[in-house]
Image (cartoon, helix red, strand yellow):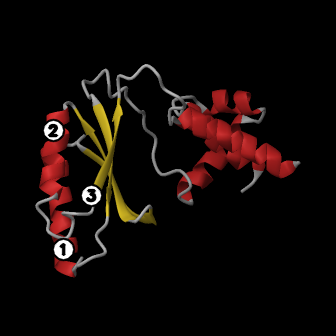
Amino acid sequence: MRDIEWKLLSELMKNSRRSDRELARAMGSSQPTVTRTRNRLEREGYIKEYTMIPDFARLGYEIMALTFVNTELGFTRKDVEKTRTFIRERISDTPLDLIMVERGKGMKYDGVIISLHKTYESFNKLRDRFRQYPFMQPNIDSFLISLHDENRYLRLTLKMLADHFSKTTKKQKE
């Protein structure tokens, strides 16, 4: 990617509500260049969507859970379909409950689920629901994050990622 593309992505991650003129000013570029670059990045799939991130604690959520699962043992095609059905149902029942379900590898697990909960009881209900599947029963561990904890170290924000992109591109030039 070219430098201007990295800069534009970085600026959009900080605040995607700005006009192309404002972005151009922040980047030290022209508005037509920003518009062309943005359109190309959208067309080529580098920009997937524009959105905002709410303060989940202010919305009444107490806990963010990272649940790690290992499904390698006995995970059949039928189990995959059951899991997909469960996820689709869960998303339609409580839209903000499950916010990410992904496959991967690490720490003896092959999947991670990120969910938000208004109470510890709602987290337990979700975990109990996962345990209904025999192929997951002994293979679940969770890490719970209090959304009201004042002692935070480094929150994941799009602005933080944008700053990281900026630093990375500067180092690549040097």
Question: Percent position (x, y) of residue 61?
Answer: 26, 29
Q: Is residue 51 above or below residue 153?
A: below
Q: Is residue 46 above or below residue 136?
A: above
Question: Percent position (x, y) of residue 17?
Answer: 51, 30
**Residue under label 3:** 140
Q: Secondary structure at mark 2?
A: helix
Q: Is residue 63 above or below residue 8?
A: above
As drawn, the residue found furthest toward the right would be 174
Label whose residue precedes the other's in the sequence (3 or 2): 2
Name the amino acid, label 2: Ser
Question: Percent position (x, y) of residue 10?
Answer: 64, 40
Marks 2 and 1 sit apart, C-alpha to C-alpha, by 24 Å
Instruction: Name the residue nearer the viewer: 88 or 75.
Output: 75
Q: Secondary structure at mark 3?
A: strand
Density class for disc 1 (Cα within 10 Å; few <14, some 14-19, many ≥20) is some
Horizontal side of residue 92 vs 146, given as left or right: left
**Residue under label 1:** 79
Can the viewer see residue 33? no
Label whose residue precedes the other's in the sequence (3 or 1): 1
Marks 3 and 1 sit apart, C-alpha to C-alpha, by 16 Å
Name the amino acid, label 3: Ile
Horizontal side of residue 145 vs 1, given as left or right: left
**Residue under label 2:** 122
